[in-house]
Every structure is written in C-alpha cells, then in structure tokens.
Image: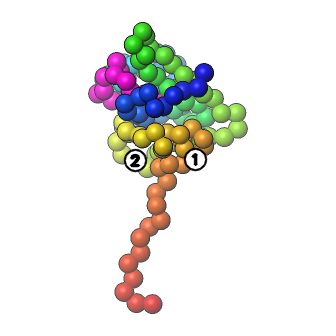
Amino acid sequence: MILNLAKFEKIYLYRPFADFRKGIYGLSVMVQEQMELDPFRKYLFLFCNRGRDKIKVLYWDETGFALWYKILEKEKFKWPSHLEEDSIGVDIYKMEAFLEGLNPWQLPHQKLNYKKV
C-alpha cells in the first residue's frame, strides 16, 4: 500500500524518539497528551525509534486508526534533532523528501557578514 500524503490536511512529526513497543492506542494517546493534537483529524503523525532506522505513521481513516511501519535495512532516517519543538508540522514536499532518504531539515549555509577582505 502506498501512503497518499495529499489526502491529509497536516503532517506532524513527533521529534523525540518514541518507544516502539507502543501500538496504535499508545501512539494515539501520545498524539493527544504530549503533542496536544486531535488524533481523529485528517492528520498524519510520524514517530521514529532511537536507532533512526524505523518509523511508525499513525492516522485515522474515518473507520479506525491505521498504523504504517517502515524499517530501513541499512540506512537511517534523517530525523530532525536540531529543532526544539516536540511536534513539528511538515509539508508534503518535505515529507516526500524525508521518505526518499533526503534531509529536508538540513540547516542552510551560515550567512557570513564580513567588513573587510
């Protein structure tokens, strides 16, 4: 099954690493209590394990919760660790880049301001 990102109003990442022993209900409680978001909206919620080689994607599809699980065999997900917020809103383009293995949260080059050569 391919996950159609366009059908979701918003996409959120839970930036701290999640306990992957949690299932659908444990993650939906995290959405409600720690992220302070409504798990029943047309939102997509992403969680990553400490090793950054697994993600869980949770969403409500109007008939129940669905959980999508991805394991990378050799690589790591480019999880944003430099941001301070626990819950990060992500647009579709960043999400597609992230799932392709790119780092959409990479900080741009530092701007320099010299006065002399």
The answer, for residue 3, to whether it is visible in the render is: yes
Figure quadrant of residue 68: top right
92 relative to 35 in the view: left or right: right
Residue at the (58%, 26%) spot, across then down? 2
Note whether 11 is above or below 59 in the view shown.
below
Q: Are marks 1 and 2 in contact (CB under 8 Å)?
A: no
Q: Which residue is mark 1?
A: 102
**Residue 41 magenta-highlighted:** yes
Who comes first in sequence, dot 1 or dot 2? 2
Q: Main secondary structure of the magenta part?
A: loop
- Identified by mark 2, the residue type is Leu
Residue 37 point in image, percent of width and height:
30, 26
Circle 1 packing at 10 Å, graded few (<14), some (14-19), many (20+), is some
Residue 69 point in image, percent of width and height:
57, 24
- Identified by mark 1, the residue type is Leu
Residue 64 point in image, percent of width and height:
43, 10
Which region is colored magenta?
Answer: 35-46
Note whether 109 is above or below 5 in the view shown.
below
Q: Quadrant of the N terminus?
A: top right
The answer, for residue 26, to whether it is visible in the render is: no
Mark 1 and mark 2: span between their CA atoms?
17 Å
